Image: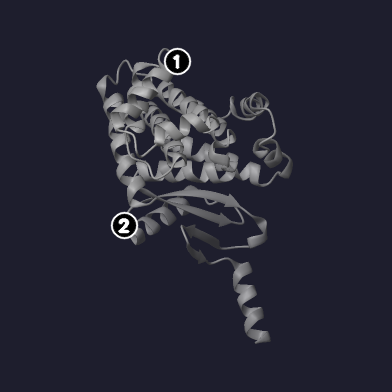
């Protein structure tokens, strides 16, 4: 994110926090998420509205009033407050406005999961499903094809996830397959997982191993990584028999490869060099 986006997004996010903190007992944050996402999709699909709401030559109050006029009676008070605040910011491009609305919807969904005590499970659900999709070209095509019917995609997501995952995971996956700004499904899920990590002030590590770690091994690994990075580390474990033994840890761009397959590859390179 550039500095202009960060500054404008911070202002919009403050409006979301005001809504979420106003009355935590009565407010359904998941409803705010769904309504803000609906606005993001509508703005993304309407070039004229997108340009007008993001026009840097218009006053923020004027753009907020336009949003209120267009959306009056279509979304609740909480979502309206967020959308008006977002439209009232200065955006470098119309696409940045849509991206901000998408991210704000995610923040509201994560806040709801946090209140339910299911944020960690949500993170695991999204990662697991992303791996399933990655391993199935047919499923990738079904979820990513921009020509496919949106309702059919939503029904497919319900069939795959509704009985096995948190409601927030189902909602996030549905938003991911909507393809906001033409973004592919896997990139959307990657962005959502990053937002979860940021919200929990944690580092996410992808751990690849030939066999599942037992609880003691897992706890030792998490403790060691947390000490090394000075923050809580959340692990997403991938079982891959091709690594033979040992583990591979990926954190951002950093890779710690202690697998036997990698050691063998290194030995072969040394022998042929």
Residue projecting furthest to the bottom: 273
Foreground residue among 3 and 234: 3
- Work out whether residue 104 can be spotted: no
Q: Is residue 191 left or right of residue 245?
A: left
Gap in angstroms between the C-alphas marked 1 and 2:
45 Å
Q: Is residue 253 above or below residue 40?
A: below
Which color scheme does this rendered protein use? one colour
Classify the position of the C terminus by image quarter. bottom right
Judged from the image, the secondary structure of the residue bearing numbered disc 1 is loop
Sequence-first tag of 1 and 2: 1
- Work out whether residue 62 can be spotted: yes
Residue projecting furthest to the top: 73
Provide the residue designation for mark 2: 230
Q: Is residue 75 left or right of residue 177?
A: left
The residue under the point 46% across, 26% down is 39
Residue 56, horizontal then vertical, whole percent: 36, 39
Provide the residue designation for mark 1: 74
The residue under the point 43% across, 38% down is 120
Q: Residues within 10 Å of mark 1 (few under 14, many from 20)?
A: few
Residue 254, horizontal then vertical, whole percent: 46, 63
- Nearer to us: label 1 or label 2: 1
The residue under the point 64% across, 27% down is 150
Residue 43, horizontal then vertical, whole percent: 49, 30
Q: Is residue 126 above or below residue 167?
A: below
When asked about the image quadrant of residue 79, the answer is: top left
Residue projecting furthest to the right: 138
Judged from the image, the secondary structure of the residue bearing numbered disc 2 is loop
């Amino acid at each position: 994110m550039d500095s202009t986006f960060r500054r404008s997004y911070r202002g919009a996010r403050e409006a979301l926090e005001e809504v979420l903190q106003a009355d935590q007992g009565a407010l359904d944050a998941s409803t705010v998420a769904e309504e803000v996402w609906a606005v993001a999709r509508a703005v993304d699909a309407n070039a004229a509205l997108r340009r007008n709401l993001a026009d840097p030559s218009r006053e923020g109050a004027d753009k907020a009033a336009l949003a209120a006029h267009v959306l009056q009676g279509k979304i609740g008070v909480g979502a309206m407050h967020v959308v008006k605040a977002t439209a009232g910011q200065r955006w470098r491009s119309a696409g940045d406005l849509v991206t901000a609305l998408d991210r704000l919807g995610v923040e509201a969904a994560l806040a709801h999961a946090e209140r339910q005590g299911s944020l960690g499970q949500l993170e695991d659900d999204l990662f697991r499903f992303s791996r399933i999709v990655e391993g199935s070209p047919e499923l990738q095509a079904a979820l990513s094809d921009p020509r496919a019917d949106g309702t059919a995609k939503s029904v497919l997501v319900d069939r795959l996830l509704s009985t096995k995952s948190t409601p927030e995971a189902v909602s996030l996956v549905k938003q991911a397959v909507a393809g906001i700004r033409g973004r592919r499904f896997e990139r959307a899920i990657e962005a959502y997982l990053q937002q979860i990590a940021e919200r929990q002030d944690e580092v996410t590590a992808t751990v690849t191993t030939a066999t599942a770690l037992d609880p003691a091994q897992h706890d030792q690994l998490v403790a060691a990584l947390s000490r090394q990075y000075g923050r809580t580390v959340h692990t997403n474990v991938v079982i891959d028999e091709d690594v033979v033994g040992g583990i591979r840890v990926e954190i951002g761009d950093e890779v710690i490869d202690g697998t036997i397959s990698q050691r063998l590859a290194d030995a072969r390179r040394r022998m042929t060099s």
